[in-house]
Image (cartoon, rainbow, N blue to C red):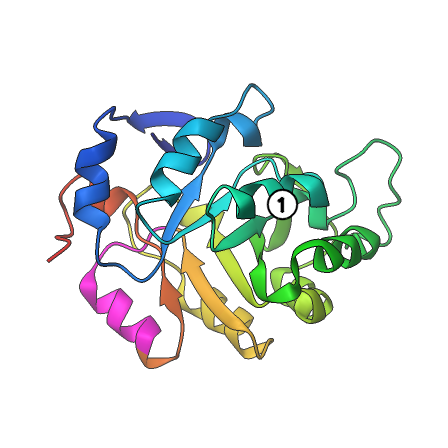
Amino acid sequence: MQLVQGETLALESTDVDGWIDKFRGFAAVQLIDLDAAMATGSNDALVRYISGKLPCRVGGGVRSAARALELIDAGATHVIVGSSLFRGARAGDPQDQPVNLPFAEGLVRAVGSQRVVGAVDSKAGQVVIHGWKTSLPITAVEAVKTLEPYCSEFLYTHVDREGLMQGTDMNAILAVARATSRQVIAAGGITTREEIDLLHAHGVHAVVGMAIYTGLLSLT
């Protein structure tokens, strides 16, 4: 399933094995359980099946260290953690300290920082959580600087361009990459091989979704 701006369904497919075959050979595949992320269910059996065939970094609804361990046990090479790394994930959390360091520390104790990919999503210049609906008083640059001791990599999504296939925001991505010594993986509107090559030249990895699913960008 692919959503535009996290809301509008753009396409979906039930051909799991077909997509597994298409992504076979890639060093890393991003697998997000959207039902778990939205707290409407989970797809654990499917996650375990795909993770047994592809090197998957799995995210979606990782709200506890125990859940992170479950995903590692299911075959995930890394866990992708987003909203729970920030305050505001629970009612009453203070907004003046938007990074949830106690949660990050517990996560590292459970699975090790080398297994944690911090998902930092940005919209209109601010970090957003809860399916990109809650804006926090912190920028993506500030977030990666604070979370660097707890994450081996960062998945930065430029939500303003996500799913639109109109190109990404290179300046925003490179600002995040310059703010951390960790590997940055960029997502959000990446559409062309030229964009991928430019990111690669700056040491940034690219996540491509819609452009591949629609056939605009070939996997070959």
Write down the region rendered in magenta.
189-200
Residue ID at (59%, 40%): 70
How many marks on residues? Answer: 1
Q: Which residue is mark 1?
A: 68
Q: Is residue 199 magenta?
A: yes
**Residue 134 versus residue 206: which sits nearer the camera?**
206
Quadrant where the image shows the C terminus? bottom left
Image position of 48 with respect to 148: above or below: above
Residue ID at (39%, 30%): 46
Magenta stretch: helix, strand or loop mostly: helix
**Residue 21 versus residue 214: which sits nearer the camera?**
21
**Residue 3 versus residue 139: which sits nearer the camera?**
3
Image position of 123 with respect to 45: above or below: below
Q: Secondary structure at mark 1?
A: helix
Horizontal side, residue 41 vs residue 99: left or right: left
Instruction: Find residue 41 and report its horizontal and vertical position in percent.
Output: 54, 20
Horizontal side, residue 146 vs residue 78: left or right: right
Tell me where residue 10 sits by quadrant: top left
Quadrant where the image shows the N terminus? top left
Question: Given the current orientation, which residue lies at the most extreme top position?
Answer: 40
Q: Amino acid at mark 1?
A: Ala
Instruction: Find residue 109 and report its horizontal and vertical position in percent.
Output: 75, 59
Residue ID at (21%, 28%): 15
Horizontal side, residue 89 vs residue 144: left or right: right
Instruction: Find residue 28 and report its horizontal and vertical position in percent.
Output: 35, 58
